[in-house]
Image: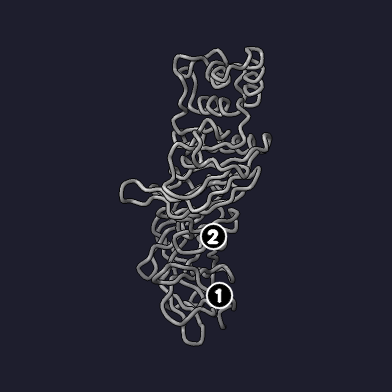
Amino acid sequence: MARVDLEGIVKRFGSTEVLSRIALDINDGEFLVLVGPSGCGKSTLLRVIAGLEDADAGVVRIDDRDVTALEPRERDIAMVFQSYALYPHMTVRQNIGFSLKLSGRPEAEIGAAVDDAARLLGLSALLDRKPRELSGGQRQRVAMGRAIVRKPALFLFDEPLSNLDAKLRVQMRTEIRALHERLGATSVYVTHDQVEAMTMADRIVVLDRGRIVQIGTPLEVYGNPANRFVAEFIGAPGINILNGKVDADGTVRAGNIVLGRSAAAPGPVDVGIRPEDLVPGEPGASDALPLTFGIVEHLGAETYVFGDHDGRQICWRRPGSLGRAGETVWLRPEPGRVHLFDKTTGGALPQITGAPSP
């Protein structure tokens, strides 16, 4: 296990700064997920930690040891890539044990380590196969086995599930998290998939254009987004954003809907309401909006309903499998579950504290 400290990390490619003064502490034994859209710098940051990219400024410390200038092999890390990076001419056994063979370990020690990793990952029956004879999920397990046998202080995962189909992704993310729990190792995991981030992380680091915009547990980030970008990026389906305003007396409105009161400064705001935080309201009530169903997606246990309101698309996430296109319902937001954002900066504003006046 290891603690990782990043201090003022800057990385440029030409004149483009892809990492801007990144400061981050990763706790010993933590499963930390770096998440953000393509091009936000998350994979570059992982490669800086690994030593595969040199930082233009800043310090990388692993267990209080400055490793900024050290080669990857000197940092006591293991990395699992998106592409598996297996040797096609080697068997599973040879792939898993290759790094130990390179370091000159005795054959008996290598064999025991490979067998232990294979049992842990359910690969014991596949040790004599070549990578071409394996499924995508099995290949990813071999890549993880190759990392495990080294017993590193730090595991780094660079979008390891992006080449797998949807069902296998769900299975593998569960297995990776369970493996982390068994090994107790420090893990840093990069993904653009916010569902992976929400289900796997102890803490999430959300990046946007080379900067950290929020750090917190999955529920903290989901329930209290630092700005509109985080609110829109985290959550599926995405958060509903409505045009709103704060009156001089603190009353918050979205169109004709009265939402309550806030300490935010008077003026236009963006109002964020998550699809599951809309519930049936009274027709014509001041705190409810009419939604005519356009697209209806039945998923069995729940239904996603999409319609338009005030020029914005609205999604309602409802339990069960009910509803059809053309139907109209009145919906109101759950009290205390409405987010307000600054129209210009996107920053979070004081939340609504009072219920709408009757």
Quadrant of the frame with the N terminus: top right
Quadrant of the frame with the C terminus: bottom right
Count neighbours of disc 2 (C-alpha within 10 A) and say few if under 14, some if 14 to 19, many if 20 or more: some
Counting from the top left corner in percent of width and height, residue 58 is at 48, 50
Residue on which disc 1 sits: 352
Q: Is residue 318 left or right of residue 2?
A: left
Q: Looking at the image, is 88 positioned above or below residue 15?
A: above
Residue on which disc 2 sits: 276
Query: How many numbered circles does the render carry?
Result: 2
Who comes first in sequence, dot 2 or dot 1?
A: 2
Q: Which of pointers 2 and 1 indicates the residue nearer the eye? A: 1
Numbered disc 1: secondary structure: loop
| Residue drawn 56% across the image and 67% down it | 337
Residue nearest the observer in this picture, 212 or 91: 212
Q: What type is the residue that disc 1 sits on?
A: Ile
| Residue drawn 35% across the image and 68% down it | 311
Residue 63's disc is: none
Residue nearest the observer in this picture, 219 or 76: 76
| Residue drawn 52% across the image and 52% down it | 7
Q: Looking at the image, is 31 positioned above or below residue 94?
A: below
Q: Looking at the image, is 13 positioned above or below residue 117?
A: below
Residue that sits furthest to the bottom in the current view: 249
| Residue drawn 45% across the image and 14% down it | 89
Occupied quadrant, residue 55:
top left
Counting from the top left corner in percent of width and height, residue 259 is at 52, 76
Q: Is residue 298 visible?
A: no
